[in-house]
Image: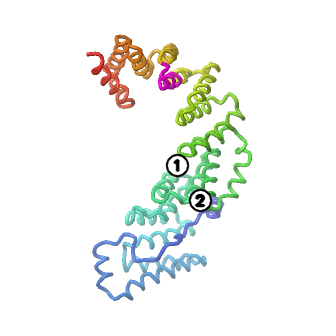
Amino acid sequence: MKKKFLFIASFLSFFPIGETLKISNGISLTTAAIIFHSPKIHAETISSIITRGIMAAKSGNYYKAIKLYNKALEMDPNIALAYLSRGVSKMKLEDFSGAMSDYNKALEINPKYVQAYLNRANLKVILDEYSKAIRDYNKALEINPKLGEAYTGIGIARIMLGSNTVACLDFEKAIDLGDKAKDLLRKYCSDIKKEGGYFYMRGNRKQNEGNYNGALEDFNKAIEIIPTYTVAYYSRAYLKEILKDYKGAISDLSKIIESHEDGSELAYLRRGVIKLTMKKNKEAIEDFNKSLEKKPNYIYPFLYRGIALLNIGERDKACSDFKEIISTFESHQYLYSSVPEVEDNANNLFKQYCK
């Protein structure tokens, strides 16, 4: 445990970062009344006690620091910073249960206390609670998306979970935001950064961030490394569709179909949808038919084929497809919770064109 604690501590900060000392991060009405109606020196005294506690902790005198935090909390039990700082000292003394209790209390007082989420997450990594730690890091990022330290922590947790490729992306993000993750990137990612999976995952992250050109470059690199990388072709096709490069998207989906991979019903469906967008209705219908040959109970092709049939004047056949969807949902009501838009669209089209 000591070895792991030192490893975590070498990359993550437990002390409050750039925080102005104040009476409370979540002052109760009673406490607020005391502050506003008491001499100023009282407030400064609590602040100075916490300051002395932090200085004692930074010099390694954790027992003295805890005594000072206790004294501050006796004067005002609603000081989130005092609980946070006391939790740090308890962590240093490996009183992990006590530290966890203090971080929980700090967050009870102030549910948006970023440093408390970070420290609690760091502690959960030490306690092997990696998934729970990632949730806390993400809560901190919801409050402040530019916390490089949170990405470093997530990366360390993922390393412990064996998700090294995704961890490398987190270390890169941390470095972009100014955190000290270069050693971790060097240690764990030198070989991974040569793998197709790394570029594929980085491409997905860039796409989610709206960096479409960067994502396209990464998908290209992933496919260059692994020419048979089916999911990378799917992702690149979807991105090309967003960029309105329909011919390029069709080319990628055709490569998946030609590879005879299982699950090609999705490739036929997506290719058909693109052709439908391009107003190539008959070609689209051929793809929807192929998709249904591969998977007869696949619900989506019925909807899109019905739309294509309407476009070429085949109303009766289109209505039959919409009716097929409606009947399927009537006999399998659980489907509505997962794909409600399919039944809603089928119902609307049926009411508009088939009655």
Front residue of 327 and 32: 327
Look at the numbered disc 2 and give the secondary structure of its residue.
Answer: loop
Q: Quadrant of residue 328?
A: top left
Magenta-drawn stretch contains 169 = no
Q: Is residue 76 above or below residue 298?
A: below
**Residue beneath label 1, please?**
131
Q: Are marks 2 and 1 in contact (CB under 8 Å)?
A: no
Q: Quadrant of residue 123?
A: bottom right
Q: Is residue 274 left or right of residue 309?
A: right
Q: Is residue 115 above or below residue 161?
A: below
Front residue of 310 and 327: 310
Q: Is residue 238 above or below residue 32?
A: above
Amino acid at dot 1: Ser
* Main secondary structure type of the part rendered in magenta: helix
Front residue of 90 and 27: 27
Q: Position of residue 101 (x, y in %)?
A: 44, 63
Q: Position of residue 285 (x, y in %)?
A: 48, 16
Q: Which residues are magenta?
A: 270-280
The residue depicted at 36 percent of the width and 87 percent of the height is: 40
Q: Alpha-carbon neighbours of circle 1 within 10 Å: few (<14), some, or many (≥20)?
A: some
Q: Residue furthest left?
A: 355
Q: Position of residue 186 (x, y in %)?
A: 72, 54
Measured in 3D between alpha carbons, the distance from the residue under mark 2 to the one under mark 1, in whole angstroms, is 23 Å
Numbered label attached to residue 171: none
Look at the numbered disc 1 and give the secondary structure of its residue.
Answer: helix
Q: Tell me which numbered mark, 2 or 1, is placed earlier along the sequence.
A: 1
The residue depicted at 45 percent of the width and 66 percent of the height is: 102
In the rendered image, which quarter contains the N terminus?
A: bottom right
**Residue beneath label 2, please?**
177
In the rendered image, which quarter contains the C terminus?
A: top left
Amino acid at dot 2: Leu
The residue depicted at 34 percent of the width and 10 percent of the height is: 316
